[in-house]
Amino acid sequence: MSKNIKLIVLICILMVLFIPLVACSGGYPYEKGTSIEKNISTDKSASVGDLKKTGWQLAISENTFSEDKKLIMKVLSESEAMNYQNDEFNFYGTPVGITINDQEHVRLDVPVAITLQIPEKHMKDLAAEKLFFATYNNGEWEYFLPDSIDIDKGTATIEVYHFSFWAFGEPSEEKQIETYAKNLATLQWDSQNRSQKIKDALTRQYDDLFKSMGVNSDSLCGQLTADMLSALEDATIDSSGIAPIDALAQLANAASKGQSGMDEYRNKYLELTGKMICHVMEKSPEKFSSYANVLGGLGTVAGAMSEGDTEGALRGVADILRGSNPIVAVADTALTFIKDSMESAVDIWGQGELEKGYQVYIGGAAGRWGSDSGLDGDIDAVFITMGGGEREFTRKIVKKYCEKYGINEEKLTQEERDNIVNNAKKALQRKFDERKVSEPAIAELQKKEQAFIAELKAEGLLAAYSYKKFFGMDKGVEYNVGDRLAKLYKIRNIVLGYVDKDKVQDLTDKQIVRLINQWMSYSEKKDRAGFFKYMRDSKYIVEPLIKDPVYAWVFEKAINFDSQKELKDQNEQGARNETYQYAWSSKEGVYEYTMTYIGDDDSWYDPPRQNGETYTARCTWSIPPKTFKAGDTITLDFELSFSNHDLSYFTGNATTSADFDDPEIGIGYVTGTNIDFVNKDGKSSFKIDTYPTVQVYSISDTVTAVAPTGREVGDKIAIRTAFNGYAQGTAYVYVWTRIE
């Protein structure tokens, strides 16, 4: 019996000794680090590393390389990692170096998933939104958003197109915000461009639609149209959870194939338009109902909405739309816009790879991420290099296109495949070229977005635990901070579309984030009416419809162009050459120009040159009105004549004109938007001339022009009266002002 007891005691002692050894060797693989060497066959997939044993793991697909390669993955030990540690980046685990045939920074033909096991010591209260992957270049860390973080398993994954030196961890708060803003500024720029294109494509058609429904106020039409354009991108409009513009895109291909497909598309557009109109009126049903006298047929719909009869309102809108001819024009114009978008709006890469592709295209990436030098401006080479080779790029772009627009890839002809690929190349090159021009604006946007993202973080909206149901994480979806931010930005645009227009510019980032918070909270409860009530109670919606304001051009100042510096220069030159002397003067509406010959008499000429021969041209213009409205006809009178002409050999001439144009443009120059004043015969420029075959010594006439409209309060324009003479004139500057 005593021998059995001794044996049991011995076993227990060995177990106690053995358990920590196992925990040390398998539970924390980063302390001592490791190195793995593996031959990769081009026609076989491979897994390199083991999360429990090595901390890092690579999932390599077949055809990642065009030929067999030797891969070495070296996970640094904690002591080795100290050489790369700095105050701005706290490692979770240790960095890993990946080389191919002993070469660093290698591009891949197919993306490889790199996964890291987050150490257990970091799992308690894990803040996934603070964690980034990073590559090491020229002594600095460059940060990238993870593709996903599995909080339950404690893993983080990123898909990469290049092997290099990678790490994972928590950068400083400043670097986190900076990296988010860098990614989101470009996305926001894209979003603003898309919204503007939707606005440009559909504004006039929606205006016509509301006027056909009996809305008899221009401002109400304009505001309803603006709200409808916002609603097109709102995924809460329909029970499908898909924004109307994206739902219609899924039917666009069928609409191009025959009448039945077109009918299906138009019926869906009719249904969604009805829902959008009711959604817009839900902002403030009582207010809309009180405007029944200017809403035409929509007044009845507004009444139903104010009584809580949503179904009745939908039926009423449907009846009105079915009898409206413009609805077909709106639907067809939207279809044209969607088709154009289909050719250009395919996401070939994630945001991180897209950014790398852009840097390669503009020549800012030579040697980074495994890219070659000399690719700037070569979109084909960029696609092949960044897209994983031409074959992989072609396969991927066609596949994603078909997935996005519900097309059966197997039924595509080769010509259709080629068109998809060529259009994608052209579209991305156009996008890259537009971005090059817009870099200063994007840089400013990035600074602005840093403050907004900081507020999102402070409110907890980037945290994985917040709004799990809303973001689908209650269904086991892994956390992706890039997707989270993109959705929050879409919500921001939608929410701001519902705030009264005169209040938007005064909102702070903190207020906007709170509005987003409320929107998601009410959306989770499917209580859109509750959200709009909150907006009204908080005074964000006070007057959903504002009766027509009155705007006018109001005089600010007169800028006189007298060219006195040029006069001095001309006279100094004339004195040196002993040829001509000039005098001219300019004040509002009165201009004079005198030229005198100061050279010697010369009878060789016929008629002879005579010292002192001279002429003076004078021009007067009436003063424009102090205030006028867009569409007003502005009338000006002028007189142009020679007040003196004692000439022998020389001749004199002068011209005058008037126009609307940019007040910053000097006399003698015009922009592409100038509007000339013309007489009854359509003539805009007038000239007097002493030349013997001309002999026009005076002109007086009346000219008119129709005043343009301003785009927003504060815009400026000038009525310019010009006299040449010598580039003389006056710019009467007006400011677009709300006067009632």
Image (cartoon, rainbow, N blue to C red):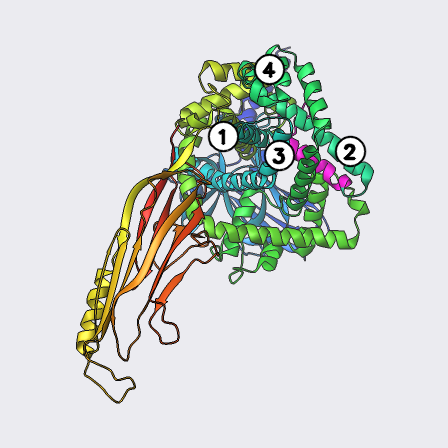
Question: Which stretch appears magenta?
Answer: 236-255
x then y, percent, for residue 79: 42, 40
**Amino acid bearing label 4:** Lys
Task: Name the residue tied to disc 2.
Answer: 264
**Amino acid bearing label 2:** Glu
First of labels 4, 3 by sequence position = 3
**Which tag is nearer the camera, tag 4 or tag 3?**
3
Please give the label number shown on residue 525.
4
Distance between mark 3 and mark 1 Cα atoms: 46 Å
**Which tag is nearer the camera, tag 3 or tag 1?**
3
Task: Name the residue tied to disc 3.
Answer: 208
First of labels 2, 3 by sequence position = 3
Residue for point 66% across, 29% down: 242
Residue density around tag 4, few if under 14, some if 14–19, many if 20 or more, within 10 Å: few
SS at mark 2 in the image: helix
**Which tag is nearer the camera, tag 2 or tag 3?**
3
Q: Please state if 187 lies on the left or on the right of 3 as rendered.
A: left
**Amino acid bearing label 3:** Asp
Residue for point 22% across, 61% down: 564
Q: Residue 229: which quarter of the image?
A: top right
Distance between mark 4 and mark 3 Cα atoms: 36 Å
**Which tag is nearer the camera, tag 2 or tag 4?**
2
Q: Is residue 239 magenta?
A: yes
